[in-house]
Amino acid sequence: MTNVTVLDGGFATQLSVHVGKSIDGDPLWSARFNATDPNAVFRTHLDFLEAGAEAIMTNTYQASIEGYVEHLHLTEDTSLNLIKSTVRVAQMARNHFLAKGLTNEQRSVPLLVASIGPYGAHLHDGSEYTGRYAADVCADTIQKWHRPRIDACLEAGVDVLGIETIPCKMEAEALLDMLCDEYPTVRFWISFQCKDNQHLANGELFADTVNSLWAKARSRRAKNLLALGVNCVHPQIVTPLFRSVNEKKLPAVRIPLIVYPNSGEVYTVEDGWQGREDCVPLEHYVPQWIDLGARFIGGCCRTYARDIQRIKQTVINHASNSNHCQ
């Protein structure tokens, strides 16, 4: 047994295997396929489960009422129902996987995690990678925007909320306050978008933000915050970010961290994803991340089910080696 939960990988990346095309640049991104090809969504979840993922995230990152109303011409009610049905597709995939029988290494039921992307994602202007809206939008607006999707995912039945790709401290604090006050029994994590090995996308120091949020949750005696960390970042910046938080802390007081980075490829609007041949496989970083307190590890953009399979094996090997050293 390990104390690390292996997450799934880049949903849109693996989904492209089933739909036969790249879906980058679509204002709804992979969320369009919740309406147009739910079977491909189902098969993508199953790919990750069969690769060893112990948690799968719903295909709701880019799903919002505003996005579905504008780009699919749905009503508010049908938009919320589509989000709920998307959760149920993930449930069906998990049930299908479990029904095929468990091996000795797969006794636990995989977690179902609602992907809750940032406010900036629905703007489709790249602001989830800058956080520039933090200066113009108040915490109350952020909470009101997130609440319907969170409620829909919870009503449909998820185990955890994955608050992800958050670019600014303001949005993270608004969500932390809301979840601790209004949803005290709902487990969640918050992972950030960072622009370098020290700062969030919006410029705040990663270490200061993480320490502040963890202290705030503890001061409220909140038990539902599972981890803090990063996703959708270059893997090379993860270790220094994690060192800035936990390196000087005793193991007993280290903050549990989460990481699911990109492959290491670089994306531009003009050229798409470039540099696959130069990427260091993610599993090479995994031992150092675990040693710095990572408790959830997976992949984001440009990571496939095969990448998750290698991460899973590395996690198992690391746990085995650690046990032999004790």
Image: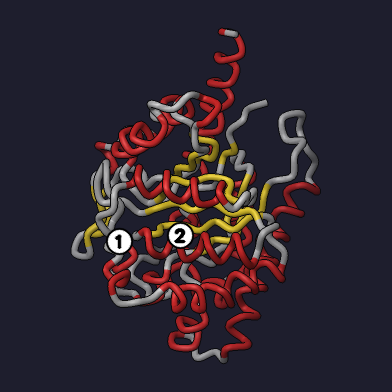
The answer to whether one can see residue 220 in this image is yes
In-image side of 308 versus 274 (left or right): right
Point 49% across, 42% down: residue: 258
Q: Quadrant of the C terminus?
A: top right
Query: Percent position (x, y) of residue 199?
Result: 27, 48
Marks 2/1: CA–CA distance:
17 Å
Query: Percent position (x, y) of residue 7?
Result: 55, 44
Question: For residue 167, what is the image quadrant?
Answer: bottom left
Point 56% across, 8% down: residue: 325
Q: Which residue is mark 1?
A: 129
Query: Percent position (x, y) of residue 1?
Result: 68, 26
Q: Which disc is residue 12 wearing?
A: 2
Up-down relation of residue 8 to residue 35 (above or below): above
What residue type is disc 1 on? Answer: Tyr
Looking at this view, is 105 or 153 the one in front? Answer: 153
The answer to whether one can see residue 302 in this image is no
What residue type is disc 2 on? Answer: Ala
In-image side of 204 versus 281 (left or right): left
Sort mark 1 into few (<14), some (14-19) or many (20+) by Cα contacts within 10 Å. many
- Nearer the observer, disc 2 or disc 1? 1
